[in-house]
């Protein structure tokens, strides 16, 4: 508001209060609120004049101040009040003194009663001083008036000094600096006299005593007198004493251990101080203080007091500030109060030393004595320590604030030095904290450049202590565990210091107080730090590389603070304190969000800084914590702030991107978390990048290298073409922003290099052109001397240079700067940092094939090529040469460009004028003076050799023929060198030959002729090559020449042909004997070139191909023979090259057969028996490796050739010899065959081994992963081309199988029979492997043909192949299905093939028939659903087979399984076969004696029966009875015989099928008939039958059940009579069968309604009571009732009313106490009676248990009570039966009976009757009665209390029972009753 408005409002409020004092509190509140929000300086004095006379003003303000802040109003009132008190003194003579006294009392009341906070105390002191001086100057008072004013103000000054000493001292010190006028100075001293004491301390000496004795006397009194005398000598300057003696005497006595002696020595020291000098004197005194501990010996107090007196004397420290400062600092710890007790010497000494001039006048401790005196006087002893030390901190802080900057800095440095010393005593530890607090509160006042360095030094002290505490992990005290935060807030610094001291005195660590003190220090330290004046905050990057020392120190301090705070917040128990400190740190230093995130960005990325300008190692843990803090803080920012954070002017996003490549997973995870909080900022130029990175979160977290892949996929050009234009623009903008960050000179180089690493896969002209300024800048710095590049800048420069690649190479033609910069990088050879590659190496590595090819301008290519060659000549670094070699090898160079570099030096052109000639001569003289030049026409052989070295293995060379003339010219120069070229040319010749070879290989890669247009034959000088061979003694030169001749043979065969034989002769004599890589390469190349030329020449001379085949075969044989001498690792390349040269489609099989022959005739014969298998396995692997060098077609063709060749060999040696004798002259083909394997020269065993090895290898090759993989990789076109080969191969295999099978038959009786059988199996193995490669369309016709083979084994193998194919494949094409269905007839013919008598292969034929049936089953399963009609004949044939009684049972089992499959598939089409099928199946299951011995057959029959029943349930009724009887029989057999689980599962499935698929009208009559048939003969089979009926009833609908209820009722009445009809049978067996019937009936009962169940139940009730009926029906009925009650639970109560009377009667009839008559007329009457009793009791228990409708009425209770209780004495069945019945049946029943009664009138008779049983004569009955009593009490719980009185007498009797068990049981019952009833029973006894 406006000042006038504020003044008006305040004036009106004041007037209103003056008129109405009753609303004083409200009015003052209004003023306070008004002044809180407005400036009070604008208020005039009028409101004050209205307020001051109001009575109760101060008291009201005091009341308001208790709850609110009234400082705004006091800030207005108090200055006016002080002014009134001072200025009203002149008016005292004329006016009444009431007003004046009113102002004085008002001010005194305000100062006394109101606490001055928020700087009010300082303001009051300042106003008081200013008003005093101002009034004195203006009024020109007389001395008397000044005295009166002083007397009037004295109380206020004293009061202010008492309550606010620091404020008054601060004002006085501050005003002292500004006084210039003498009058003001006099008034100021007058004012000071009001507050300061004038007394001075003097040193007391006793001069009357004279002392002079021996200084070394053992008695201390003597030494004391000696020292006194010595003092007199010093004072009187007596002569005759040596100075050294006096010095030593004084100093030695100061080290005495007797205080009195030392005290006397101090007086002597004082007198002698002028001679000793100040330094020595002070040093001796300080050593005294260091060795004396007053807390242990108070007698030293006078000594130390005297020592202080000496130091206090101005003479010793006069004009020696350093020495004085040393003394003050050394003794500073004595100012700390360590004990509150005045009588202690240490306390007295502290009080004394504070009053000394040393400290009272020292700038640091000035005023401390008065403050301490005031604290000690006015404080309670328990508070003295804390308050005094706190006051000491305040005093020193205030004094430091008043010092000059230089003095202040000097004292602070001294304090830091003192605080950094080792702490030992309690006093020193307390002094450390006091000094540290003082330092923390004082550093804020320091200015630069000292502020930050001092703050760092102070923080180092503080940090060390805090880290030590965090490391120790001291546990909290219990008192602080409850609510530590609130308790700490309530404690003052003095209290904490006092507690800390108490803990130290008790030898404790003071951990908690130490925590609090140090965190409070940290809390004060953080705001005390001042940011430097450097403008780094406004910069985008806080770049330590460019910041000055002050800024770096500031950032280092902030990082260290953040580190310690985050460590404390995450690890210590004072986490809440450190969290508050974190908030304080952010609030004070990083309040601006942009500054905060710049700081966090520095934390995120500084550990990548290799230069470490901040001199701080930032650990990964701190980095991760900072990232998570950043993530949290981002989430708390506003939208506009987040938008700023993700803008291009913020370092946040680049810093996070750099962290995504961090090798530590958790850092990447934290960076991703932080990036996710920025993911919604779509306006950010980085948004496409952020979006892409967040999509790859999991990959980036898992792989640190993935971030570069993500950038690559984002910015690659091909997918960007599909994106909208706006999106491409956003991507381009994002890329430019990232590159801009990397190029920005203000961006830290380590950030830029990190961004470049992330963009290492993003390359384009745009990228390179954007980075050129940065490249130029960094290269300029790199070329400076000395180099000023940082290590991070070196890495950045390397990354930028790597942007020269194929994607950006086109820029070199468009931008001359890019080319010049690249060449400059190529020439930058300085190694800036050891271990880092030079820029030259990096630039060379960028010249890749793609880069060089992308240079569209040939001139640029030529220039770069020349630069590279010049570098190669000039460089002395082997790494550079190696790199150039790699570069040149990789790039594709035009040969013409290289030829220009190889040309001899050109002659200088002749000058056209005389002036030009003269100028040329002058230049020539100057150049010759510098260095001699090569003559014109000479060759620079060093440069040529280096270029040739590069060329000799150069692959990527364009127009290589252009080099041929130049190379032959150089070769000619080597053979005929000039006189001045005195060098060894052997190496040069080898290089030239190698280059020519390389060119030949490029011109004719296949080694064939070339067109004269490419290279004229005349230009290729073969004579020079031959001359090199003849004229050189070097083997390497020979090798190179031979290789070149071999290459030339294919290109110019006519020129080389006449030299072929000499070449081979030379090779055989030399190269073949060498064992090195180069020699074998020569062999390979020669073979590759010369042999084709030989073949070509042979073809030209003769038209007979056989001659060529013989020649090639001989060559291959030579290589095979030499193979054992070839190193293993070279065998495969040599043979592969050989076969590729001669043609694998024609000669691969020849090589394989020759290898087999070599193994049979040489390798296997020389190997031992144990090694033969290993040798064969090794050779087979090698042969497969050889085959896999070639295509699939070539391998299959070779196998066909081998299969065609093997039958041409004789079966055995003898046959072969006889055949060969009759032959005439051998043909070419026969000669070739003889070369492969000569029967004449090998044994029969070798022949058989050769055949077996050939077939075995074919199986291995067909099964090898390499061949299968190649077949799988073939496309559709290749697959079609393979079909013919595969079909031919299969046919050849089958032909060979027939041949071998024929040989098996012919040699069956010969010793070689086993060999032929094994060979046949191997042949089958080959067939299997071929089958795996066959396509289905080829496979099916082949299999059909094989099934017609006369050999059973062949037929079986074919069916096995078919079965495997059917099982493995799930989807078939329709055409394939038709082909497969045609196989049904072939399979049925095999099934119907009858066994002939006298045949030896019966078993094999049976296996074949089983296999055929299995094949039919698989065909039906696969295709029967869609082609049902096709399988009707199959079913008929299978039925015919099982009707044949003589059929073999395994075949019949397979037929049954086939029937099961076919029937379930063709469904209704199988109905016509049922009349034959079902009787046959049932007959097989009935008539077979071996039924159980052949489990598989039994399982097959059951499976067939189950599938037929499941498929055609409505058509099996004629056979149903037989099926049921059979199932019942098999079910019983399965259980008794323990058959397999599979059979049990099948039987269960069959039972379920019969129970669920058949209608009740069909099944129920049949079940009744089966029951009638089985009940008398096979009773054990009734169980499975009843199980079927039970499941059937369970699936019946309600309507069906109602319609068939009468039928079922009749059946169950009949079935329930089983016990009565078989009363004499075994009870256990009868119970089992009856149980099945009852379980079945229960299923029906549960499905009946109440209306339908009631008549059924009563009918059963009448059934059991029928006259003349067997009593056994009672057992059945009550067992049934028990089961029904268990199922129906509470519903059974509706029908149980009629059972009460019969049950009561039966309980009496079965009680031996009641009757002696037998209830049952049989021998086992007792067992039956016990069983009946058990059923009845169980039934009653369930009735009582589920009674919810008051079923047990009074009448029914009376009817049942006595019979039930009497059962306690029923010993029916003996003692064991009695115990079981009572425990398990009777007692639970009676207990539940009591619950069901629910009436205490009925409980009493029940309880009494039970109690009567306790007096029974039988101890067993008494025991049972006690158990019953306990159970009854357990059920009734607290209701039993009404029954307790009558129970106690009976229990008392039983306590003394004659039976010990009863007595013990009674005791247990009593104990349990106490537990149940909850009160002791002893009072009842």
Image (cartoon, rainbow, N blue to C red):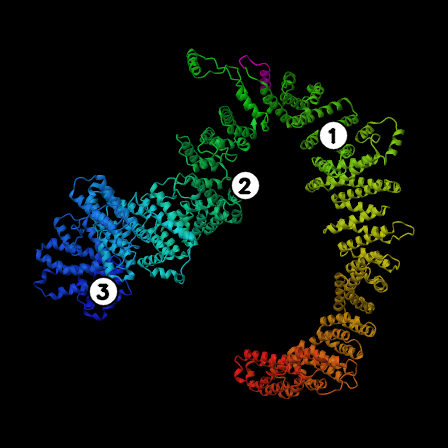
Q: Which mark is residue 113?
A: 3
Relative height, residue 602 to residue 1188 (above, below)? below
Mark toward the viewer: 2 or 1 = 1
Q: Label 3: few (<14), some or many (≥20) within 10 Å?
A: few
Label 3 vs 2, first from the N-terminus:
3
Q: Is residue 1431 left or right of residue 18?
A: right
Q: Is residue 1223 left or right of residue 569?
A: right
Label 1 vs 3, first from the N-terminus:
3
Residue 87 falls inside the magenta stretch: no
Location of mark 1 (residue): 1120
Q: Residue lying furthest right in this view? A: 1398
Residue 970 falls inside the magenta stretch: yes
For the residues bearing labels 2 and 1, Cβ distance under 8 angstroms:
no
Q: Which mark is residue 1732?
A: none
Q: Nearer the viewer, residue 585 or 369?
A: 369
Location of mark 2 (residue): 718
């Amino acid at each position: 508001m406006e000042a006038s408005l504020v003044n008006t409002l305040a004036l009106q409020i004041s007037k209103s209060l003056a008129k109405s004092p009753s609303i004083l509190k409200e009015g003052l509140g209004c003023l306070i609120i008004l002044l809180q929000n407005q400036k009070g300086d604008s208020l005039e004095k009028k409101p004050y004049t209205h307020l001051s006379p109001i009575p109760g003003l101060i008291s009201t303000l005091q009341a308001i101040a208790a709850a609110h802040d009234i400082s705004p109003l006091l800030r207005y009132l108090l200055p006016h009040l002080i002014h009134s008190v001072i200025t009203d003194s002149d008016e005292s003579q004329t006016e009444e003194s009431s007003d004046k006294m009113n102002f004085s009392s008002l001010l005194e009341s305000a100062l006394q009663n109101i606490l001055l906070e928020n700087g009010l105390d300082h303001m009051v002191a300042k106003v008081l001083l200013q008003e005093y001086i101002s009034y004195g100057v203006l009024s020109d008072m007389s001395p008397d008036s000044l005295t009166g004013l002083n007397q009037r103000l004295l109380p206020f000054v004293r009061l202010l000094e008492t309550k606010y000493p620091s404020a008054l001292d601060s004002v006085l010190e501050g005003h002292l600096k500004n006084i210039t006028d003498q009058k003001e100075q006099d008034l100021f001293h007058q004012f000071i006299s009001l507050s300061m004491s004038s007394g001075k301390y003097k040193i007391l000496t006793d001069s009357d005593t004279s002392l002079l004795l021996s200084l070394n006397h053992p008695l201390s009194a003597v030494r004391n007198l000696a020292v006194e005398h010595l003092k007199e000598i010093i004072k009187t300057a007596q002569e005759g004493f040596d100075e050294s003696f006096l010095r030593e005497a004084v100093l030695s006595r100061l080290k005495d251990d007797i205080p009195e002696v030392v005290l006397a020595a101090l007086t002597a020291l004082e007198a002698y101080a002028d001679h000793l000098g100040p330094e020595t004197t002070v040093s001796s005194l300080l050593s005294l203080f260091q060795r004396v501990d007053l807390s242990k010996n108070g007698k030293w107090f006078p000594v130390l007091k005297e020592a202080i007196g000496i130091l206090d004397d101005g003479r010793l420290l006069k004009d020696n500030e350093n020495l004085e400062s040393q003394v003050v600092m050394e003794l500073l710890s004595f100012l700390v109060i360590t004990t509150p007790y005045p009588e202690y010497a240490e306390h007295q000494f502290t009080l004394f030393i504070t009053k000394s001039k040393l400290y009272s006048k020292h700038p640091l401790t000035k005023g401390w004595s008065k403050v301490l005196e005031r604290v000690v006087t006015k404080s309670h002893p328990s508070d003295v320590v804390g308050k005094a030390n706190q006051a000491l901190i305040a005093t020193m802080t205030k004094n430091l604030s008043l010092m000059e900057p230089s003095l202040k800095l000097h004292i602070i440095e001294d304090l830091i030095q003192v605080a950094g010393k080792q702490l030992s005593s309690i006093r020193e530890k307390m002094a450390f904290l006091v000094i540290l607090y003082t330092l923390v509160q004082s550093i804020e006042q320091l200015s630069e450049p000292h502020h930050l360095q001092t703050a760092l030094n102070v923080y180092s002290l503080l940090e060390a202590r805090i880290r030590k505490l965090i490391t120790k992990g001291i546990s909290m005290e219990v008192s602080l565990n409850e609510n530590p935060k609130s308790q700490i807030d309530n404690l003052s610094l003095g209290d904490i210091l006092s507690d800390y001291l108490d803990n130290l005195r008790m030898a404790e660590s003071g951990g908690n107080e130490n925590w609090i003190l140090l965190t409070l220090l940290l809390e004060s330290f953080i705001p005390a730090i001042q940011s430097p004046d450097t403008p780094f905050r406004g910069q985008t990057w806080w770049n330590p590389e460019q910041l000055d020392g002050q800024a770096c120190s500031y950032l280092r301090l902030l990082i260290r603070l953040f580190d310690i705070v985050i460590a404390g917040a995450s690890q210590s128990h004072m986490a809440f304190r450190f969290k508050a400190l974190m908030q304080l740190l952010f609030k004070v230093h990083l309040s601006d969000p942009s500054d905060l995130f710049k700081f966090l960005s520095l934390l995120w990325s500084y550990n990548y800084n290799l230069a470490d300008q901040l001199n701080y190692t930032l650990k990964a843990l701190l980095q991760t914590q900072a990232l998570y803090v950043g993530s949290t803080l981002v989430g708390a920012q506003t939208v506009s702030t987040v938008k700023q954070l993700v803008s291009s002017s913020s370092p946040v996003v680049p810093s996070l991107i750099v962290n995504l490549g961090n090798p530590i997973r958790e850092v990447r995870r934290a960076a991703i978390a932080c990036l996710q909080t920025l993911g919604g900022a779509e306006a950010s130029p980085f948004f496409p990048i952020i979006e892409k990175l967040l999509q790859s979160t999991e990959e980036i977290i898992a792989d640190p290298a993935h971030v570069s892949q993500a950038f690559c996929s984002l910015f690659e050009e091909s997918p960007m073409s599909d994106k909208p234009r706006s999106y491409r623009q956003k991507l381009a903008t994002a890329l430019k922003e990232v590159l801009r960050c990397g190029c920005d000179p203000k961006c830290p180089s380590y950030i830029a290099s990190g961004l470049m690493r992330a963009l290492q896969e993003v390359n384009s002209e745009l990228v390179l052109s954007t980075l050129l300024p940065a490249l130029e800048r960094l290269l300029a710095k790199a070329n400076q001397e000395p180099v000023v590049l940082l290590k991070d800048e070196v890495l950045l420069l390397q990354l930028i240079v790597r942007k020269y690649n194929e994607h950006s190479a086109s820029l070199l033609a468009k931008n001359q700067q890019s080319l010049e910069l690249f060449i400059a990088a190529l020439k930058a050879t300085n190694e800036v940092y050891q271990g880092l590659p030079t820029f030259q190496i990096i630039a060379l590595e960028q010249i890749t094939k793609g880069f060089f090819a992308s240079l569209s301008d040939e001139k640029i290519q030529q220039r770069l090529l020349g630069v590279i060659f010049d570098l190669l000549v000039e460089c002395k670094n082997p790494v550079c040469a190696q790199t150039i070699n790699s570069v040149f090898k990789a790039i594709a160079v035009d040969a013409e460009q290289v030829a220009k570099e190889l040309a001899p030096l050109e002659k200088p052109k002749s000058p056209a004028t005389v002036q030009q000639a003269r100028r040329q001569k002058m230049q020539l003289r100057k150049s010759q003076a510098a260095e001699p030049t090569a003559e014109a026409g000479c060759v620079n052989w060093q440069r040529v050799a280096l270029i040739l070295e590069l060329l000799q293995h150069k692959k990527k060379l364009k127009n290589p023929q252009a080099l041929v003339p130049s190379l032959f010219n150089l070769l000619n120069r080597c053979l005929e060198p000039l006189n001045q070229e005195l060098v060894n040319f052997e190496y040069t010749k080898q290089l030239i030959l190698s280059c020519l070879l390389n060119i030949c290989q490029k011109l004719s890669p296949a080694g064939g002729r070339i067109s004269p247009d490419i290279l004229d034959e005349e230009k290729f000088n073969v004579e020079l090559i031959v001359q090199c061979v003849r004229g050189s003694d070097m083997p390497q030169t020979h090798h190179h020449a031979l290789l070149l001749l071999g290459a030339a043979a294919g290109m110019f065969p006519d020129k080389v042909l006449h030299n072929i034989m000499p070449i081979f002769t030379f090779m055989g004599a030399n190269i073949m004997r060498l064992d090195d890589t180069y020699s074998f390469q020569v062999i390979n190349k020669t073979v590759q070139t010369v042999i084709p030329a030989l073949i070509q020449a042979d073809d030209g001379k003769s038209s007979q191909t056989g001659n060529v085949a013989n020649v090639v075969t001989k060559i291959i044989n030579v290589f095979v023979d030499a193979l054992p001498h070839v190193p293993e690792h070279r065998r495969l390349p040599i043979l592969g090259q050989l076969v590729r040269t001669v043609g694998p489609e024609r000669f691969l099989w020849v090589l394989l057969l020759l290898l087999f022959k070599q193994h049979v005739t040489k390798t296997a014969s020389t190997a031992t028996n144990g090694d033969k298998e290993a040798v064969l396995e090794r050779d087979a692997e090698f042969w497969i490796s050889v085959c896999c060098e070639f295509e699939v077609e070539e391998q299959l063709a070779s196998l066909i050739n081998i299969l065609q060749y093997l039958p041409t060999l004789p079966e055995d040696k003898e046959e072969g010899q006889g055949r060969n004798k009759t032959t005439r002259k051998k043909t070419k083909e026969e000669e070739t065959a003889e070369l492969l394997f000569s029967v004449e020269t090998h044994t029969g065993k070798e022949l058989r081994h050769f055949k077996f090895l050939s077939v075995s290898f074919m199986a291995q090759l067909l099964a090898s992963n390499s061949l299968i993989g190649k077949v799988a990789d073939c496309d559709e076109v290749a697959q079609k081309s393979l079909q013919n080969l595969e079909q031919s191969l299969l046919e050849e295999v089958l032909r060979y199988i027939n041949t071998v099978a024929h040989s098996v038959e012919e040699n069956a009786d010969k010793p070689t029979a086993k060999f032929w059988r094994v060979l046949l199996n191997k042949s089958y193995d080959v067939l299997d492997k071929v089958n795996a490669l066959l396509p289905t369309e080829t496979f099916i016709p082949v299999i059909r043909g094989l099934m017609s083979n006369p050999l059973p084994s062949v037929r079986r193998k074919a069916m096995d192949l078919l079965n495997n194919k059917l099982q493995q494949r799930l989807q078939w094409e329709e055409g394939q299905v038709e082909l497969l269905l045609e196989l049904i007839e072939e399979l049925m013919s095999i099934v119907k093939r009858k066994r002939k008598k006298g045949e030896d292969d019966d078993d094999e034929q049976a296996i074949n028939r089983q296999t055929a049936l299995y094949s039919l089953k698989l065909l039906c399963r696969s295709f029967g659903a869609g082609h049902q009609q096709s399988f009707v004949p199959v079913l008929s044939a299978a039925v015919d087979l099982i009707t044949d009684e003589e059929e073999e049972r395994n075949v019949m089992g397979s037929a049954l399984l086939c029937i099961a499959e076919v029937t379930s598939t063709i469904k209704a089409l199988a109905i016509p076969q049922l009349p034959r099928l079902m009787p046959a199946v049932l007959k097989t299951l009935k008539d077979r004696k071996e039924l159980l011995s052949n489990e598989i057959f039994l399982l097959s029959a059951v499976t067939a029966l189950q599938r037929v029943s499941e498929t055609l349930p409505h058509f099996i009724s004629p056979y149903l009875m037989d099926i049921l009887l059979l199932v019942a029989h098999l079910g019983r057999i399965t259980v008794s015989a323990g058959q397999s689980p599979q059979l049990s599962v099948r039987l269960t499935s069959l039972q379920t099928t019969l129970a669920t698929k058949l209608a009740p009208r069909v099944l129920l009559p049949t079940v009744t008939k089966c029951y009638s048939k089985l009940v008398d003969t096979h009773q054990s089979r009734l169980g499975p039958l009843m199980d079927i009926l039970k499941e059937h009833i369970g699936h019946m609908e309600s309507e069906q059940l109602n319609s068939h209820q009468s039928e079922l009722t009749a059946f169950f009445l009949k079935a329930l009579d089983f016990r009565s009809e078989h009363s004499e049978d075994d009870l256990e067996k009868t119970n089992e069968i009856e149980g099945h019937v009852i379980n079945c009936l229960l299923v029906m009962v549960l499905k009946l309604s109440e209306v339908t169940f009631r008549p059924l139940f009563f009918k059963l009730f009448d059934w059991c009571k029928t006259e003349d009926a067997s009593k056994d029906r009672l057992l059945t009925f009550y067992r049934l009732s028990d089961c029904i009650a268990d199922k129906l639970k509470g519903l059974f109560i509706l029908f149980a009313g009629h059972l009460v009377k019969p049950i009561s009667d039966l309980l009496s009839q079965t009680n031996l106490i009641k009757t002696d008559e037998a209830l049952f007329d049989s021998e086992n009457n007792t067992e039956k009676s016990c069983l009946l009793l058990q059923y009845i009791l169980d039934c009653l228990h369930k009735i009582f248990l589920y009674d919810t409708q008051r079923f047990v009425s009074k009448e029914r209770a009376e009817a049942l009570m006595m019979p039930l209780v009497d059962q306690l004495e029923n010993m029916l069945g003996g003692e064991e039966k009695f115990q079981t019945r009572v425990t398990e049946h009777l007692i639970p029943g009676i207990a539940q009976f009591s619950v069901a009664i629910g009436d205490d009138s009925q409980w009493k008779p029940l309880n009494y009757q039970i109690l009567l049983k306790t007096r029974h004569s039988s101890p067993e009955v008494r025991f049972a009665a006690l158990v019953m009593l306990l159970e009854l009490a357990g059920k009734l719980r607290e209701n039993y209390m009404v029954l307790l009185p009558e129970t106690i007498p009976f229990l008392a009797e039983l306590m003394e029972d004659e039976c010990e068990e009863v007595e013990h049981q009674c005791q247990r019952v009593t104990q349990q009753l106490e537990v149940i009833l909850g009160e002791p029973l002893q009072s009842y006894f």
